[in-house]
Amino acid sequence: MTDNSTQARMAAELQQLWHSHFPLSKAMDVRVQDFDGRRLTTRTTLQANTNIHGSAFAGSLYAIQALTAWGILYLQLQHLQLDASIIHASGRIDFARPVLEDIVAGSELPLAELDADSLRANGKLRLQLAASVTTADGRSASSFSGDYAVRLNR
């Protein structure tokens, strides 16, 4: 796909975009941890996202996973050099266990799963993406599924 330096640059640009245009991401201190060309991993501190029980706030878990899924889609569109608007149309989350440490979320979208030809032909596309949060010991803490609408900017 792309080399490591290009992936790092794309990830840094995504984080800057989030912090400039998605105020919640800055308040939550969402950071891009890694982007390997097909998977995006994000991280935020528990301290900035704690509920009254001392665990991760459910809204923060939803937000970081929705942003991470949005982010991997954005990065893949950038790789394809497609200028498009992305809308988070709907989402669903399941909580399996409390998160008692920094929140780490991941989402994957291999380029082969992004129907770029259909997007180019129709100017729009709707797809479902998944994201997840795991605990430090690797157990599933929450899983997210969201519908995203993409429209080419023409």
Image (spheres, rainbow, N blue to C red):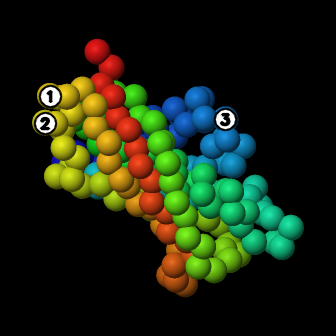
Q: Is label 2 or label 3 in front?
A: 2
Q: Which amino acid type is marked by label 2?
A: Asp
Per the image, the residue denoted by label 3 is 23
> Observer-nearest residue: 56 or 26?
56
Going 16% across and 36% down the picture, which residue do you hit? 118
Measured as percent of width and height from the top left, residue 11 is found at: 42, 43
Indicate left or right for 112 with 67 as reference. left
State the mark number for residue 117: 2
Indicate left or right for 46 with 44 as reference. right
Measured as percent of width and height from the top left, residue 151 is found at: 33, 28
Q: Earlier in the sequence, mark 2 or mark 3?
A: 3
Indicate left or right for 8 with 44 as reference. left
Q: Residues within 10 Å of mark 3 (few under 14, many from 20)?
A: few
State the mark number for residue 95: none
Residue that lies at the very extreme toward the top in this rendered image: 154
Q: Residues within 10 Å of mark 1 (few under 14, many from 20)?
A: few
Looking at the image, can residue 119 be seen?
Answer: yes
Looking at the image, can residue 39 be seen?
Answer: no
State the mark number for residue 121: 1
Label 1 – label 2 distance at C-alpha: 6 Å
Q: Which amino acid type is marked by label 3?
A: Pro
Label 2 – label 3 distance at C-alpha: 33 Å
Q: Earlier in the sequence, mark 3 or mark 1?
A: 3
Going 58% across and 29% down the picture, which residue do you hit? 21
Q: Are the two marked residues, 1 and 2, in contact with CB atoms closer than 8 angstroms?
A: yes
* Dot 1: element: helix
